[in-house]
Image (cartoon, grey):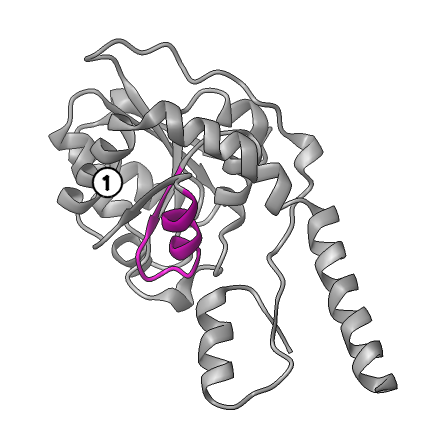
Amino acid sequence: LTVLDEGSARRLRGWGVRNVHLVKPGVDVTKFQHTPPPVNGPDGPIRLLMASAPWTLPQFESKGVDALLAAVQQRPNLHLTLLWRGVLTDEIHRRIAAADVQDRVTLHDGLVDVDSVLATVHAAVVMATTANIVKAYPHSLLDALAAGKPVLVSRVIPMSNYVEEHGCGQVVDAVTPASLLAAMDRLLNDYESAVATARAIGRRDFSEGAMIESYRTVYNQLQTDKAA
């Protein structure tokens, strides 16, 4: 049995399930370049990317869109880039206008060159109130790490354990503006180290080749067990 995160593996083993193997997801890391973060002075703009758009109205809250817009309201130097899916576009425009942050929110609705967008931001963020509304390892965060950009991720998302262990970003404890801004400040206080870590591990741990090699290891182990 293969799982994506160590927490799931521990639970299954605790339940007596044998032959549990950890296989992290992989992305095409060749599509991404390591670009320097945007030039930024002590009070300069901080730019975050959020690419886990909601599919339903309740997900504006549960995926942290409302919290992100509120954080932009509260922090004048925070800029937000949103990648949208052509769903609920009028609603996000309405909420951006209601928050009066049109000058600090960039919305891309439709296909974009994600590498080019990542080159314009300091970090990527995915938030969720429950783990079942996003992937265990959100692809937008894997893309960010492949591009050498740190990540902010909710505590309930399994990838948070990896982020906390390796130091390639910060964990957001709750889907609130205060928790997001606290995590962002922690990231900025150690930003250069987080960037260096993201560059070192993003392509190493989350490439398609690494994923295939993990599956090959599982297959070889099964063959060995079968022959024993």
185 drawn magenta = no
Left or right relative to 4: residue 131: left
What percent of the width, then of the height, locates residue 68?
Answer: 25, 40
Secondary structure under tag 1 reads helix
What percent of the width, then of the height, locates residue 100?
Answer: 17, 29
Residue at the spot 47% in from the left edge and 27% down from the top edge: 196
User: 146 or 89: nearer the eye?
Assistant: 146
**Residue labelled with disc 1:** 183
Q: Is residue 170 above or below residue 162?
A: above
Q: Quadrant of the C terminus?
A: bottom right
Tell which residue pokes out farthest to the right in this image. Answer: 227
Q: Is residue 122 visible to us here?
A: no
- Image: magenta residue range: 151-166
Q: Quadrant of the N terminus?
A: bottom right
What percent of the width, then of the height, locates residue 25?
Answer: 61, 55
Q: Is residue 142 above or below residue 112?
A: below
Left or right relative to 22: residue 190: left
As shown in the figure, which amino acid type bears the numbered disc 1? Ala
Residue at the spot 63% in from the left edge and 62% down from the top edge: 23
Residue at the spot 65% in from the left edge and 45% down from the top edge: 27
Left or right relative to 95: residue 9: right
Q: Residue 116, located in which quarter of the rendered image?
A: top right
Q: Residues within 10 Å of mark 1 (few under 14, many from 20)?
A: many
Left or right relative to 197: residue 104: left
